[in-house]
Amino acid sequence: MKYIAIIDDQKFVVAVTDEGIMTVSVDDKQCEIDFQHVPDTRLYSLLLNGKSYDLDIDHDEDTFNVMLDGIRYEVEVQDERTRRLATLRGSIGGSIGEILIKAPMPGVVVEVPVKVGQQVSQDETVIILESMKMQNEFKSPKDGLVSSVRVSEGDAIDQKTIMVTIS
């Protein structure tokens, strides 16, 4: 599984190859690291290029606060799937005109919390889709009016199916 770690606007690609063994890419240079959790603590051991580091890591959802050598780093972590969904959401369209919210992958509609004619606010959830045993919330990219809802709860849909239209 690949992850993107963002620290102070710098992006690092992290690929987990085996349990605890990871490959980190920085500016197309790869290095292998050994990263182990100390059970029942927030402490981790990191072995990088033959040097050992002790880390204190606290996290809240996708943000990790990492203490290393007395310096605190805030690290945002996204997996490939989450990053791809965010990119797809970003390509839904601008805030002018009609917005078509399409399924980025096949799935089952779990919930449609909006109705035709309903006013929605930017970032309000308009549909919840389950795919690969994970639920994905799709939010309105702008304030607007729900002009059509083309799916119902329980529907199995294909990739690129138009689910909701907002005008």
Image (cartoon, grey):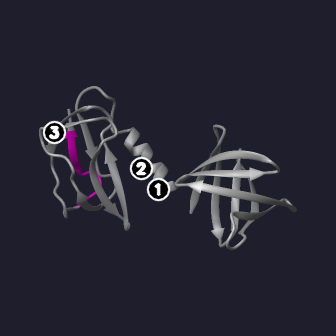
Q: Quadrant of the N terminus?
A: bottom right
| SS under mark 2 | helix
Q: Determine the residue located farthest toward the top in the rendered image.
A: 96
**Rendered view: 94 above or below 135:** above
Q: Is residue 145 left or right of residue 17?
A: left
Q: Is residue 108 above or below residue 76?
A: below
Image x and y of residue 95, in percent: 31, 28
Q: Nearer the viewer, residue 31 or 46?
A: 46
Where is residue 37 drawn, in percent x and y?
70, 69
Magenta segment includes 97: no
Label number found at residue 110? none
The alpha-carbon separation of the residues under discs 3 and 1 comes to: 30 Å
Residue 12: percent from left, percent from top = 66, 48
Quadrant hosting residue 14: bottom right
Residue 130 vs 25, above or below: the answer is below
Residue identifier under label 3: 118
Location of residue 9 with respect to 44 vertically, above or below: above
What segment carries the magenta color? 157-165
Specify few, some or many for label 2: CA neighbours under 10 Å numbering under 14, 14-19, or 20 or more.
Answer: some
Q: Nearer the viewer, mark 3 or mark 2?
A: 3
Q: Residues within 10 Å of mark 1 (few under 14, many from 20)?
A: few
Q: Residue at x 29, y 52 (%)?
A: 103
Residue type at the position of mark 1: Arg
